[in-house]
Image (cartoon, rainbow, N blue to C red):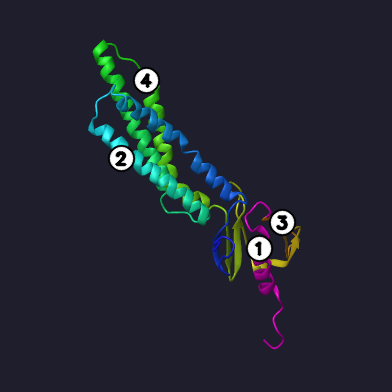
């Protein structure tokens, strides 16, 4: 069942871009970068050029977990691309790979510098470390970032944001005079003071259905009270 296509009648619903499933698959395949870092890291060990140390064992363990998580992520996206886990474990595994390899490269260069007696600044370990921090932030913030698009229907009104960097619209039913459809997935709201607001769900997955939900709640809220009530 597509959870994004069958939201609750009231409450907060996360909205997704109409190409969300494709974007998530592309993001997952984008983790080829850390996989290549891992491949280049273990190649000297497999070739016998470096010793088999506990750090290398840790790299192998994290790499195995990383591959399992990537397969799990692809299968997960195939069945339900709209579910967001609280922690993005694949991003966390990517961060671990980059952090370990950052230390590995730094240690290798540090040993070489001590042998030469000349200290040099090596940027690659710091670049890997910075990328590891970025992946950690993404791992714990991705669900919150995805939730920036939302539709929140309440008995007294509604709030919505249809673009992640856009501003949220929040209106009370009492302030509205009318609500009407505009285009295939837009809604036009008329306030009592003459102002109008156009909200578009066109770029969202199941946009027309979300627009219709908003219109249905508006029609119920703006319907005249029965005589004698």
Q: Nearer the viewer, residue 38 or 100?
A: 38
Query: Is residue 80 visible in this depiction of the protein?
Result: no
Q: Position of residue 77 (x, y in %)?
A: 50, 52
Magenta part of the chain: 202-229
Q: CA distance from mark 2 to mark 3?
A: 53 Å
User: In the image, is 221 to the left or to the right of 20?
Assistant: right
Please tell me the numbered disc located at residue 191. none
Identify the residue shown where x is 57% and y is 60%.
Answer: 4
Mark 2 neighbour class, 10 Å CA radius: few under 14, some 14 to 19, many 20 or more: few
Mark 3 neighbour class, 10 Å CA radius: few under 14, some 14 to 19, many 20 or more: few
User: In the image, is 133 to the left or to the right of 195?
Assistant: left
Q: Earlier in the sequence, mark 3 or mark 1?
A: 3
Q: Dot 4 corresponds to which residue?
A: 122
User: In the image, is 197 to the left or to the right of 7?
Assistant: right
Q: Earlier in the sequence, mark 1 or mark 4?
A: 4
Q: Secondary structure at mark 2?
A: helix
Q: Tell me if label 1 and label 4 are in contact, CB under 8 Å.
A: no
Identify the residue shown where x is 72% and y is 78%.
Answer: 224
């Amino acid at each position: 069942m597509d959870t994004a296509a069958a939201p609750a009648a009231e409450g907060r619903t996360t909205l997704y871009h109409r190409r969300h499933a494709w974007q998530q698959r592309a993001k997952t395949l984008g983790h080829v970068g850390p996989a290549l870092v891992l491949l280049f890291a273990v190649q000297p060990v497999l070739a016998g050029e470096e010793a088999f140390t506990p750090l290398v064992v840790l790299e192998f363990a994290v790499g195995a977990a990383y591959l399992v998580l990537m397969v799990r992520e692809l299968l997960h996206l195939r069945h339900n691309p709209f579910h967001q886990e609280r922690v993005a474990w694949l991003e966390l595994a990517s961060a671990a790979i980059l952090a370990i390899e950052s230390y590995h490269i730094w240690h290798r260069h540090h040993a070489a510098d001590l042998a030469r007696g000349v200290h040099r600044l090596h940027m690659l370990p710091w670049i890997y470390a910075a990328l590891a921090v970025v992946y950690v932030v993404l791992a714990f913030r991705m669900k919150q970032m995805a939730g920036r698009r939302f539709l929140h229907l309440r008995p007294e009104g509604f709030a919505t944001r249809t673009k992640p960097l856009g501003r949220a619209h929040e209106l009370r039913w009492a302030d509205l005079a009318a609500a009407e459809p505009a285009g295939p997935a837009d809604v036009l709201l008329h306030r009592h003071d003459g102002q109008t607001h156009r909200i578009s769900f066109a770029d969202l997955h199941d946009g027309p259905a979300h627009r219709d939900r908003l219109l249905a709640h508006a029609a119920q809220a703006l319907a005249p009270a029965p005589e004698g009530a």
